[in-house]
Image: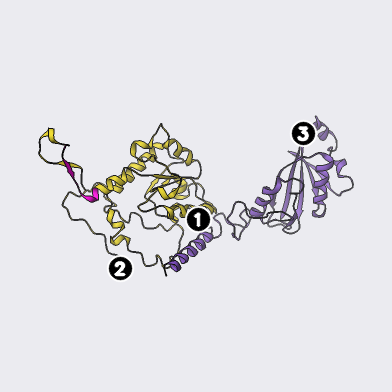
Amino acid sequence: MSDANATASAPRFVAALGSLPHCVSQSPDGPVVEVELAQLKDVLRALRDRAGFEMCSFVTCIDHYPSEPRFALHHQLLSFEHNDRVRVRCVLPGENAPTCTDLWPGANYMERECFDMFGVRFEGHPDLRRLLMPDGYDHYPLRKEFPHHGIEPDKLYREWDRARREQWTEGAQ
Amino acid sequence: MGSLKPVGPESNEQQGSGFFATRADFLINWSRKNSLWPMPLGLSCCGIELMGLLGPKFDLARFGAEAARFTPRQCDLLIVAGTLTWKMAQAARTIYDQMPDPKWVVAMGVCSSSGGMYDSYSVVQGIDSIMPVDVYVPGCPPRPDAVIDAVLKLQKKIEREDPLGRLIGPATAPRPEEGTGKLVFQPNQGLPKGAWDKHAHDPKSRLAIGDPLPRKTEVKP
C-alpha cells in the first residue's frame, strides 16, 4: 500500500511539487502541505496533474480570530489511483483567495459555501453567490465574532414584507 | 351551537325521510370542518411523519382531510411540518397568502412551534412570527396520532367559529396598521389568533338554537 510508504518516508507527492516552496507535515489524518497564497494555485495544479489527485474532497476555511491573519484555507484532495489524501493549508493574508473551480469543477459549491459562511472571496469563481443564507444578508455566520442568535435574522423578511405591503397599497390606490 | 335534527312527526319510521332544519352557522361550519384540504409544507423530518399520516395506516381520510393538494389555491389547511428558516419564511408566507379564505394553520412539531432545538440565527423562532397559527403540535417529530389529534381539535375550533364573521363581522375590520404599509413586524410577536373564534377559551361552550350570537368586542377605528 502506498499509505505504508507515505508514513515510512516522505510522501509520494513531494516529488511532484518540485521547486515550489512548501512545508510538509504530518497530521493525525494525513499529510499536510503548507503553502503561501502566491503558490497555492500552482501547488494545487501540480498535485492534480503530476501527483494524480483527481478529486477535491472539500474546500473549507478555519477562522483563527482574534489572531492575525485570521483565515486559513484548507483543500482536502483525494487520489483514487494511489488511495491517499493530502491537505493543502494556506493562511490568507486578507479575505481573497484564488478559485480552484477550473481544476476541480466540484469545488464550485464548496467555495460558495465558504464565501457564504466566512466571507472569503474566491477570485475567478464563475458564480460567487450566497448558498445557504439569503441573498442580501450582510454578515458571515461562521466567523468567530458572529453572535449565536445572529444579527437581525429577520431583517430581509421584514424588508420583503414591507415592500409587499407597499405594493398592495399602491395597487389599491 | 346546533345539530342536524330531522324535523317532522316524532314517529321512528318517518324519521330521516323528511327534511332537516338547522342553523346556517352550524351547517357551514360542519361542512368546513369535515372537508379540510391540507397543504403539506414538509420542511424536514416532520414531513416524513406527515406522509405517514396521509398514508393508509393512519389515514387522515377518516377525518375528511386526506385531499392533500400541492397548490395552495386549492387548500384551506396549511400544515407547516418542520424547521422553518428565515430563507424559507418568504416562501411560506407567500403560500399562506395564496390560500383562499377561510384557512387554518397547524404548526407541526416543536421547530415550527417555537424553533425547537434550533435556537439559531437561521431559524424562525416559531412560525407565529410570520403567520397566525391555530393549533400547535408538540413532538420532535410528533407521531401521526398527535397530528390527528390536532386535526380533531381544529375541527372543534371550526365548530365554534362565526362563519359569516370572516365577511361582515367586526373581527374582519382591518386593524389600523394593516393595509397601510405601516405594519411594523416584530419577530416572536404573534399575530392575533382565533379572530373568528367565538369561545376561544371555553371549548365546552355550545349555543343552543335560538340563543343570541355573542358579538365580539368592537375594534376601535
Location of residue A1 by image quarter: top right
What whole-number distance in Å separates the C-alpha atoms at marks 2 and 1? 31 Å
Report which quarter residue A55 is drawn in: top right
Q: Is residue B215 left or right of residue B77?
A: left
Tag 1 or tag 2, which sits nearer the N-term?
1
Q: Secondary structure at mark 1?
A: helix
* Residue type highlighted by circle 2: Lys
The crowd level at tag 3 (other Cα within 10 Å; few <14, some 14-19, many 20+) is few
Q: Report the residue at 23% width, 50% height from top.
A: B24
B178 left or right, relative to A50 = left
Q: Nearer the viewer, residue B57 or B113?
A: B57
Disc 3 from disc 1: Cα separation: 46 Å
Q: Which chain is purple?
A: A
Disc 2, SS: loop
Neighbor class of circle 2 (other Cα within 10 Å; few <14, some 14-19, many 20+) is few
Would you name the residue on which mark 1 appears?
Answer: B90
Label ID, residue A83: 3
Mark 3 vs mark 2: tell me if same chain: no
Residue highlighted by disc 2: B220
Q: Which residues are magenta?
A: B16-26
Which is more foreground, mark 2 or mark 1? 1
Q: Chain B hue? A: yellow
Say left or right for A17 vs A117.
right
For the residues beneath circles 3 and 1, the answer to whether they share a chain is: no
Residue A153 pos. (x, y %):
53, 58
